[in-house]
Amino acid sequence: MAKRKDIETLLREWEEEDREAREIRRREADWDFIKKQPPRIRAALELYVETGDLHLAARIAGMTVDEFNELRIKANIPVVI
Amino acid sequence: MSSASVDTCFLINWARFSERDKLKLVFDRLFMPVETFNEVKSDVALSLASRWLAKRYLVLAPTLSRDETEVTEILRIVAERPQIPSVDPPELYAFVLAKRLGIPMLTDNKAPKRITQLLPQYSSVLVFDSFDVLEMIADRGYDLASLVDKFMKETRFRFARRRLEEAGLLG
């Protein structure tokens, strides 16, 4: 396991990365498109906007990650890395 | 030039990128576990995978029983650490394959990179995302700003401000 201080530094960096990425996804998403989707798909897209977690969102939508990736492009939600 | 292990996310993203063949400037062969390949469903990604499979640029790799054990162990570790984004077995097979073969893993999922940063037993695994690979291509004589701009437009990607600054792409 990495040293405690290193872990804290990492966690701070990751938190900042995740915050910036979430703001970009929220800002650029096509919310009109998202709101028109059936509840399950809408929930998955909203989860993706909040977390950027493609696997989890695909699971919620009942799709593969490849299929969900097509959907997130239609919803204009960027991948942020 | 080395080979690399590739996961679904990376393949489907690069399938949309018109400069995808520049990957061959950096990696001479891509390996993908069969379990990972089974996740590829879209026409655009399957079309690219078919072309690369035909030329043996992409090679499907079998999964060993010890890979299964390691994937299960990593899933347990990730579940205990909410700071690591969730990761599915198909991506982890690519991660474990990279470790076993001693080659880099290409992925746009944050989890594998964070696993290598957090867990010493995986710190030797090199994990590159699309931005890293674009920088490697640029090192072969291409303009990074143009590559990044085109990649972002064609794949609906955004790169974090910190990374753009570190690469000298922000003023």
Image (spheres, rainbow, N blue to C red):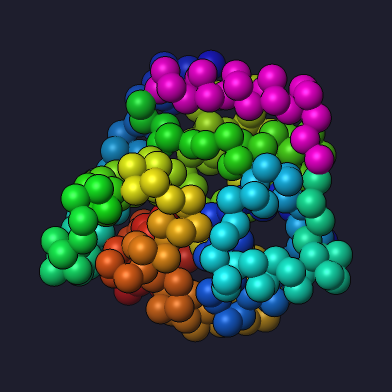
Assess whether residue B73 is covered by the magenta stretch: yes
Residue B171 location in percent, x, y? 32, 74
Whether A47 is drawn above or below B152: the answer is above
Asked if residue B139 shows in the view, the reply is no
Asked if residue B77 shows in the view, the reply is yes
Residue A54 location in percent, x, y? 40, 48
Whether B133 is drawn above or below B67: the answer is below
x 70%, y 25%: residue: B68
Assess whether residue B113 is covered by the magenta stretch: no
Q: Quadrant of residue B74?
A: top right
x 79%, y 51%: residue: B60
Residue B83 location in percent, x, y? 36, 30
Whether B83 is drawn above or below B5: the answer is above
Residue A40 location in percent, x, y? 25, 48
x 60%, y 67%: residue: B45
Please state if B78 lies on the left or on the right of B140 as rendered: left
Please state if A32 lies on the left or on the right of A21 as rendered: left
Whether B171 is drawn above or below B120: the answer is below
Count of marks overlaid on the render:
0
Give B100 or B58, whichever is nearer the viewer: B58
Q: Main secondary structure of the magenta part?
A: helix
Please state if B124 lies on the left or on the right of A20 as rendered: right
The C terminus of chain A lies in which quarter of the figure?
bottom left
x 80%, y 30%: residue: B64
Q: Which residues are magenta?
A: B62-81
Q: Quadrant of residue B46?
A: bottom right
Report the residue that reaches farthest toward the front: A38
Please state if B7 lies on the left or on the right of B56 as rendered: left
